[in-house]
Structure formats: structure tokens, C-alpha cells
Image (cartoon, rainbow, N blue to C red):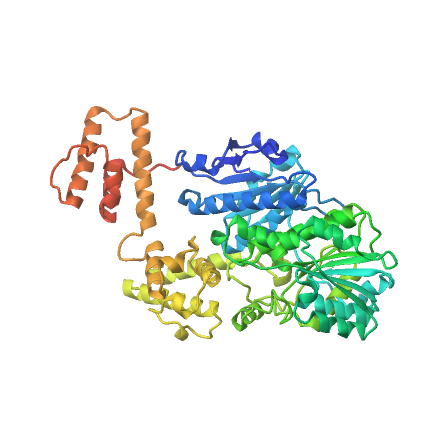
Amino acid sequence: VPADPAPWYVLAAEDTDPAVALGSLAEPVKSLGELREGDEAPLRMVAVPLAGRPGDAARAVHELTHHALEQMQEFLAEDRFARTRLVFVTRGAVAPHGEAVTDPAAAAVWGMVRSAQMEHPGRFLLADVDGGASSTAVLPTLPDTDEEQFMVRDGRVRVARLAHVPDVAATADAGPARWRSDGTVLITGGTGGLARILARHLVTAHGTRHLLLAGRRGPNAPGAHELCEELAAHGAHVTLAAADVSDPDNVAALVAGVPAEHPLTAVVHTAGILDDGVLDALTPDRVDAVLRPKADAAWHLHQVTRDMSLDAFITYSSTAGVLGSPGQANYAAANAFLDALAEHRRAAGLPAHSLAWGPWADVSGMTSALSEEHVQRLRRAGTPPLEPELGLILFDTAVARDDARPVLMRTTAGRGSSLPFAGPVPPILRGLVGGRRTAAGKNRAAELAALLDGLRPHERTLHLTHLVRTEAAATLGHDTAEQIGADDEFARVGFDSLTSVELRNRLAGATGLRIPATLVFDHPTPQAVAEHLAQRLGRGSTPPAGVLHAELDRLDTALVTALAADSLDPAVRAGTAARLRALLARITGDGGERPGADDDVRERIAAAGAEEIIAFIDSEIGRPTDR
């Protein structure tokens, strides 16, 4: 722990296990609002303990994700927390090999926060602890690293890394070939693109003879009857069922309807929907809409089949749950729950695979909507979409292996490859990409600062404008900055909330600044953004607002401290007040004193010119001593 750490707090609104453990190490508060209304001391970290309701994971996943979303949105809205880390602390949401996942609902928060980390780099951390004193004592050290996700056991910190699996096709002949041929395979989302591809594959490549395809529209889905006829021609008997698998009664009835002579032997859960939006735009209703058909349905399927002798229980998850995905925090939450459920089932001795798919090419309701621009962005990121043929090879391979939650994606990433959102390499990918980009980002920012110091004011703005245009063009997939004009409005050239976040992250990496996600909405052209960055970097025509506010904070602190200690003699107090009034009089043009001037001096001083305020602070209060 740092020798003299800034204070940290724990939100202890509920008496959960993590809250009890953390309460002895940090100052407990009921809400972020208490910190917002408190003193102005710097905050290093705020811990948010989370624990799912025992026994009802479907309900708990909604409660926990709502709570996490609320805390993150409130946290991001407060300037006071700009240098603070919000740390979500769980117990049993993730687990090392050989240990059970005991809280799959809390795992959904991990998926949500992973996406938030990509949208807002440096603001959020995740930690799963074992509840021991040695493990919780480690928590205050976590913000001092460049990692984002931690698992702490017996006081030892572990971090996750993805690694390539060699010889992908080596075991592709196994998998579904081992399932009982006389049994029924249930596929949810049964008439969607991914389900159709899988159904054909099971029938033609693995000899499956009994399929139950369940979807909201059942036999009324477009192309459903044609699919049945196609599969029947290969000797399969296909049943189409209209069912809402997010409803536990529907799931129970669906499974009960499987004929005894062809009992249910495998479940493949492919159902899901998207409702994309950046974190600030999400609502609990939008989170629920995505959780129900994927997370809730998976839990109901687990509950109904847990006592059956299944050959396979497979959920179609997504890399969004493992890596995070900007603009998809709700979708990432749902998929992280599926991954945790697979681990939870394995620990109970039940079959389970959660397949975390990368994007597929032109096959499903969720991926067919990808624009060409989005596909090109994926390719630039080193994660091009999967062609169906490769996807099916990966399916067979994954189901044949013992890994409960493999990540199935194409990647061309390697040293020097680009990655989405141009900030630091997510730590989990460092084993694939090779090397850290944090240090490189710092070097890039330092090089920019040195370059700007050697330029005249108008040259600085020109250089920053070109930087903004270049990064904006790269965000949209253009080859050169020439395709984005200095006065082009971002909204008119194709920026949306998601690409706006990407541009923000690119510029944050280039400048080393913390930049709000609303950057392109507050400053709607490259020229306007460049002028804003010049001010923030201290290279504008006047000292930047950040410098001015810091000086005002210093003045405020010095005055409050001196007054509280009663260390100002009457003459000094009178002289200080007179100087403040004189300064305000020059700024406002009053030329004299007003009744109540002492009362509102702190409010009106913000209107002073930057140089005047800073000069006044230095002459009257002096420079602060090192602390």
C-alpha cells in the first residue's frame, strides 16, 4: 500500500460479504452522493462490493447490472471523480482452474464493466476476492498498476491473458459426433442465422436425426418451413416450436414436450438480441431487454435440465463478454453471465460449454446488420468476421475440448497491429498482441508536448487540427486526413455515439489527457476540438481552464484552512478581503464596494481573467508547500 495514500471509500449500502470485508479497510458511505457533497480532498478509489441474491441468478443479474450501471453513470457525471478509480469487488464471479464460480450474476457486471473500461479508459477496475483479510488488504494497491481486472486469492494477485490454441482442426472430427444419435437436440433462436447454420451442420456432418428448433415465431418465422424440408431431405425430423425462452414456464413446457422415445440429449442456446448504446445512454430497461433472451433463458434452461442426462449444454456467447465491446455493455453483461454459468455447471459435474464467438460474416440477425464500415473496422482491429465454414470447424473443435469457455475468433493481431479504440492495449490481449501500449502512449503524448512547445501559437492550433482530422479519418476508415475538413461537423461526416467514443480514446492516447466522452458533441468540428485541446494542453492564447480551476481550488483551500485555524490576524484578514474586492471591481467595472461583496466573493471570482487570478493567488497566498 502506498506510504501515504489518498483516502478511499466503500459503498456499503447493503451488508454483502464483500462489503463486510471491505468495511474494516475503508471509510463506508451509503452512496456516491455522500462523497460528492463532502470535502474536496482527492479521492484515490471507491470500492463497490457486489453479491448476487442466492438461488435466483436470473433475478440477481438484473439487480446487480442495474446497480452497477447506476453507479458508473453517476461516477462519470461528477468532475470530482475525474482522477478516482471506481473498483467493483466481487466474490466468486470469476474463478481459477479448479475453483467454482459461485456468483454467475456478479459475473455479468464484469462483462458490463469490461465494456465501460473500453469506453472510459482508466476509470474502472474489477477485482474478485476470496474474502480473506490478506486478499482484501491488497485492494488499495490495485490502482497503482496498469492492469484492469484482478483475481485475488490468499493475498496473491492474478490477471487474465488470452493465448492462441494451436492446431485448431486437430480434434474437429469429435464433438457432436459423440452425442447419442437417437436423442433430441434443442436449439434456441432456432430459426435465426446461426441456428440454421448449426442445424444443417448437425444433420449433414454429424448425423443428428431429431431437432427441436425453438424461437419466438416458431413455424411462422420466414424460411422456417423451407429449412424443415431441406433437413428432412437429409433424413432428419425437425419440430418447430414457438416459445419465449426468457419465460421459465415456456422453457418447462418446451422441454416437457420432447418425446420419451427421443429424449433431450443436447441443448444449444443461440438466442439473443442487440440494443447497442454507449454507457451514458443505457437505461435499466435497455439492459433488461438484452439480458432476458440470453442470460435469463440460459438460467431457465439450466434449471429445467439440470437433473437430465445431457450429452451437451452449449451456449453461444460473445467476445464482448470477455474483452468488452464499446457500445455494448448490456450485451457484454449477458454474455459474461453465460460464460460464468458454464463454469458454474462444470463445478456441479454437469456438461457445459460457453462459446465466446467473435463476429460472424453475414449470417445472423445480430451480425447481418454490420455495415461495411463496421466490417472494415473489425479488419483493421485484427478481428475480421468468421466465415461460416471456419465457424463450424471451431464449433466442432471447441465442443470436443475440455475448456468450458473458449474464445472463438479470427485474429490477425500481432506486434504492431492496430486495435480498436487506439488507446492502451487491453491487458487481457497482451499475450496475443505482444507488448504494452501504455508506455508507447505516454511517449507519444510527451513527443506531442515537446513538438508544440517549439511552435508558435497559430502553428500549434494548425498541428492539433491536423492531428484531430487524422484521427477522425482513421476512426471512420478513411485513408488520409484530407477526407475530413477542419470545419466539417462530425455528425455530418458520419460520427455516431460509438465512433465519437473511439475518436475520444484516440485523442486521449495522443495527448495524454483525460477527455470526456462528449468531446465531439461539445466541440463539433476538428477545428473546435483542436482549440479545446490547445487550451487543455496549456498551449492556447490564455492559460487553460484546468489551470485556472486548479489555482482557484488552491486559493479556496488556503483560505478555508487559514480561517478554520484562525491564523489570520485582523489586519491580514482585512487586507485579503480588500484585495479580493479590488480585483473583482476591476473585472466587473464596479469601481467600488458593494454590500455583500464578502459573501459572494467565492462565486464571482470565477469570472476573473486567468492571469489576474493566478497572479493574485501567488502574491497574496503564495505557492503551496510540498505535502
Q: Point out residue 224 in the picture as x, y percentages from the top left corner.
A: 70, 69
Q: Point out residue 170 in the picture as x, y percentages from the top left corner.
A: 80, 68
Residue at the image position 40 percent from the left and 61 percent from the top:
448
Foreground pick, 517 / 227: 227
Query: Where is residue 557, by image quadrant?
Result: top left
Residue at the image position 60 percent from the left and 46 percent from the top:
62
**Horizontal side, residue 77 vs residue 274: left or right:** left
Residue at the image position 23 percent from the left and 48 percent from the top:
609
Q: Quadrant of the N terminus?
A: top right
Residue furthest left in the image:
591
Q: Point out residue 620 in the picture as x, y percentages from the top left corner.
A: 23, 37
Q: Is residue 199 visible?
A: yes
Number of numbered tags placed on the structure image: 0
Q: Point out residue 398 in the picture as x, y percentages from the top left corner.
A: 75, 62
Query: Where is residue 93, by image quadrant?
Result: top right
Q: Quadrant of the C terminus?
A: top left
Is 478 rendered above or below residue 181?
below
Is 549 rendered above or below residue 471?
above
Residue furthest front in the image:
220
Q: Is residue 93 visible?
A: no
Is 456 rendered above or below residue 19?
below
Foreground pick, 164 / 355: 355
**Horizontal side, residue 20 vs residue 509: left or right:** right
Foreground pick, 409 / 246: 246
